[in-house]
Image: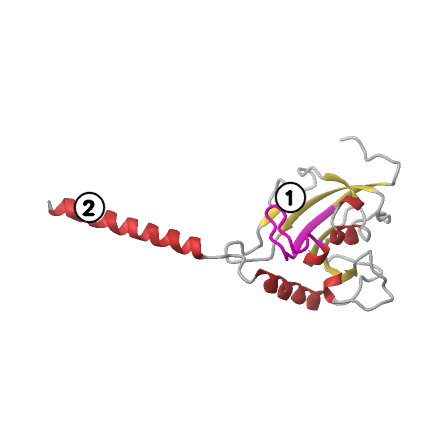
Amino acid sequence: MKRLGSIFTVLAAVVMLTVSSCKETKEFDDHANWKKRNADFISDRASDCGNEMPETAVKGSRFRLLSFRLDPEKSWSKTDYVYCEVLEQGTWTDTPYYTDSVRFNYRVRLIPTDYYPEGQVVDQSFKTASLDPSVNIPASFTVSSTIEGVITALMHMHCGDYWKIYIPYGLGYGTSATGAIPGYSTLIFEINLTEIARKGESLSPR
């Protein structure tokens, strides 16, 4: 009987721990104070990235790009820019126009949180942990069909470029939730541009 009583005691303790753990998980909000945390995050990126894109952006370059919709002769706030880091430098000279079609590998994350220290992945074409162009199959888009922050970056990229891009929510999906993306989310894109086709031309066959 003592042995059976001990087993019941252990089982009761396990149940209590499980209930307690579930309660803590339920009450924990990984997106608490989300708007401010995202604003602080993009402010830090603005400090890291500095001024406008240099004439020649090489691997390791960090810079900002004003939204393509805005007049560069006027003054704008830091949330009107996307902030970029060159991870790999391409060799092509052409950049896409707003009306072009493109192919690129991509991964999209939210800002780092307790649950997701590297940022939750909310969309991607990558099939590998890191970029491997020999394995990954790039997705096809018209430049104009993507969000404002991505359009802004793409129009400065060359084929072969691989950039990390930080996009304020105003140049992303705004204040409303979209799928797994909460409102007010800064988006962290990795983009590897692989092909450009001018308006009226077709991307190469797969």
* Residue 85, horizontal then vertical, whole percent: 72, 58
Left or right: residue 65 versus residue 118 is right
* Residue 169, horizontal then vertical, whole percent: 68, 57
Mark 2 or 1 closer to N-term?
A: 2
Using the rendered image of the protein, determine whether residue 62 is visible from the camera's viewpoint.
no
Kindly give the residue lying farthest to the front in the view shown: 176
Kindly give the residue lying farthest to the left in the view shown: 1
| Local SS, label 1 | strand
Amino acid at circle 2? Ile
Instruction: For label 2, count other residues whose C-alpha is less than 10 Å away and answer few (under 14), some (14-19) or many (20+).
Output: few
Using the rendered image of the protein, determine whether residue 10 is visible from the camera's viewpoint.
yes
User: Marks 2 and 1, how far apart in space?
Assistant: 48 Å
Q: Residue at x 62, y 40 (%)?
A: 127
Which label was assigned to residue 5?
A: none
**Residue 65 position by quadrant:** bottom right
The residue labelled by disc 1 is 124
Instruction: For label 1, count other residues whose C-alpha is less than 10 Å away and answer few (under 14), some (14-19) or many (20+).
Output: some
Which label was assigned to residue 7?
A: 2
Amino acid at circle 1? Gln
| Magenta extent | 172-192
**Residue 1 position by quadrant:** top left
Q: Is residue 146 placed above or below 203 in the rendered structure?
A: below
Q: Residue at x 67, y 42 (%)?
A: 132
Kindly give the residue lying farthest to the top in the view shown: 205
The C terminus is located in which quarter?
A: top right
